[in-house]
Amino acid sequence: MSLEENKAIVRKLTEDFNTRNLKALYESIAPNVVLYTNALQMHGLEEYKRFIAMFLKSFPDYRDSIEDVIAEDHQVWVRAIVTGTHTGEFRGSAPTNKKFTEPHVHIYRIVNGKVVECWAVVDELDFLKQRGAIEITEQGKHLFPDEKVLP
């Protein structure tokens, strides 16, 4: 597949996720897909489907906004801004009803028109801070006085 076709697959996959067209989303993903994030790995489409169902219960308004797309060989790199509101339990954390906005980098490997691997590079610390899951200590405020997300 061409670089443009691979980028189109990723753009469609993102749009399908944002519009909750999950049937179409899953058609873009290989059955033996492997997904990597900072916190976990998922193997196979069925495990990915379970994660997406849980994730959308936690953040039903989650949206992925593509800012940049770069493609080379079988890989497509995306810089995105994601937003959402924590309205459901997530990884044992009670809902905070707090909104978050954060940058992500997604790296997709595409073979025969399907995503076979995906890496999501996420600032987990910022995600936890924005949801109110962790608090910044006085020492943290002293060490990072110019940090714009600190209270």
Image: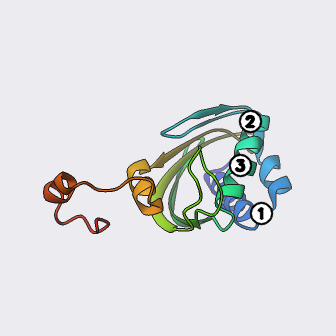
Res. 87 image quadrant: bottom right
Mark 1 vs 3, N-terminal side:
1
According to the image, label 3 marks what residue? Answer: 54
Mark 1 vs 2, N-terminal side:
1
Label 1, label 3: how far apart the Cα atoms are: 13 Å
Residue 58 shown left or right of residue 150 in the figure: right
The outermost residue toward the right is 23
Residue in the image at 80% along x and 48% along y? 26
According to the image, label 2 marks what residue? Answer: 47
**Is residue 45 positioned above or below 23 on the image?**
above
For badge 2, the amino acid type reads: Glu
Residue in the image at 81% along x and 61% along y? 21
- Percent position of residue 32, x then y: 75, 30
Comparing labels 3 and 2, the label whose residue is closer to the camera:
3
Mark 3 vs 2, N-terminal side:
2
According to the image, label 1 marks what residue? Answer: 20
Label 3, label 2: how far apart the Cα atoms are: 11 Å
Check disc 3 and report its element: helix, strand or loop.
helix
The answer to whether one can see residue 5 in this image is: no
For badge 3, the amino acid type reads: Met
For badge 1, the amino acid type reads: Arg
Badge 2, how many Cα within 10 Å: few under 14, some, many 20+? some
